[in-house]
Amino acid sequence: KAGVTQTPRYLIKTRGQQVTLSCSPISGHRSVSWYQQTPGQGLQFLFEYFSETQRNKGNFPGRFSGRQFSNSRSEMNVSTLELGDSALYLCASSALGTSGNYEQYFGPGTRLTVT
Amino acid sequence: QKEVEQDPGPLSVPEGAIVSLNCTYSNSAFQYFMWYRQYSRKGPELLMYTYSSGNKEDGRFTAQVDKSSKYISLFIRDSQPSDSATYLCAMRYSGAGSYQLTFGKGTKLSVIP
């Protein structure tokens, strides 16, 4: 089974620009969540999508948005980039496994640098 | 006081040692408790997911939750060099119209051969 894929892996943008990151979950997983990881703040939850609907949202400004498509692929958009948005952006797909246990798998992340 | 406190380490132990990693929290509404392992330049990997107080074992890993003390632990038995990574705890609550998932800052573990 293929893992979670994220594109692009690395990105350099300028302040004020916008960026779109993509995540393809594990086949059959309908839940996709996004996280921001920085040395200072650690790992922080951005939002979660399930069957094309945003189910939960973390404490981030409205510049951070996302969506999920019918094939469960998800995109995350950050508008009006700030220097502080430089981070590793991770997505994860999750589902209940065949044994009823919660399964969650992360992608390798997209390293965003804002200059 | 931060909602989730985790000693960043680094923690260095000899191969074969028992490792104890801990997190404390202040929000009694947390219901679900997770431990992740993250190797350098990789995404986190979910190791343990627990709901209630008590112990949960999976191979060499044991997760312990003490809700009365607001304290969770991850024990690694017979530690191996391949266990060298950063370990993050995470906690979640969900209720009508609200949801919060909070991570600890992570403890960096080195297992020395």
Image (spheres, coloured by chain):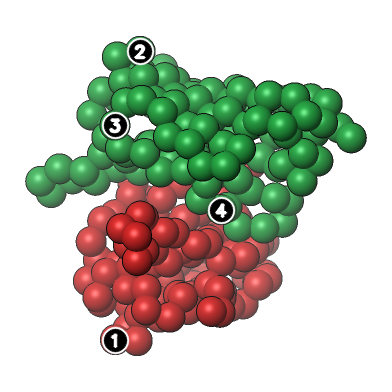
Chain colours: A red, B green
Residue position for label 4: B45
At numbered mark 2, what does the secondary structure look like: helix, strand or loop? loop
Query: Around disc 1, counting alpha carbons within 10 Å, would you say few (fewer than 14), some (14 to 19), or many (20 or more)?
Result: few
Mark 1 and mark 4 on one chain: no
Mark 3 and mark 2 on one chain: yes
Please report the residue visible at 82 percent of the width from the left and 31 percent of the height from the top. Answer: B15
Q: Nearer the viewer, mark 3 or mark 1?
A: 3
Identify the mark at residue B52; answer none if there is no mark.
3
Residue lying at the far right of the rendered structure: B113
Q: Is residue A4 above or below residue A56?
A: below
Q: Nearer the N terminus, badge 3 or badge 4?
A: 4
Q: Is residue B6 left or right of residue A73?
A: right
Q: Nearer the viewer, mark 3 or mark 2?
A: 3
Distance, label 2 to label 1, CA atoms, is 43 Å
Please report the residue visible at 68 percent of the width from the left and 71 percent of the height from the top. Answer: A10
| Circles 3, 4 touching at the beta carbon (< 8 Å) | no
| Circles 1, 4 touching at the beta carbon (< 8 Å) | no
Instruction: Name the quadrant containing residue B17.
Output: top right
Foreground residue among B100 and A84: B100
Mark 2 and mark 4 on one chain: yes
| Circles 2, 4 touching at the beta carbon (< 8 Å) | no
Q: Which three-letter amino acid code belongs to the residue tagged 4?
A: Glu
Query: Around disc 2, counting alpha carbons within 10 Å, would you say few (fewer than 14), some (14 to 19), or many (20 or more)?
Result: few
Q: Is residue B21 left or right of residue A69?
A: right
Distance, label 3 to label 1, CA atoms, is 34 Å
Distance, label 1 to label 4, CA atoms, is 26 Å
Residue position for label 2: B69
Residue position for label 1: A70
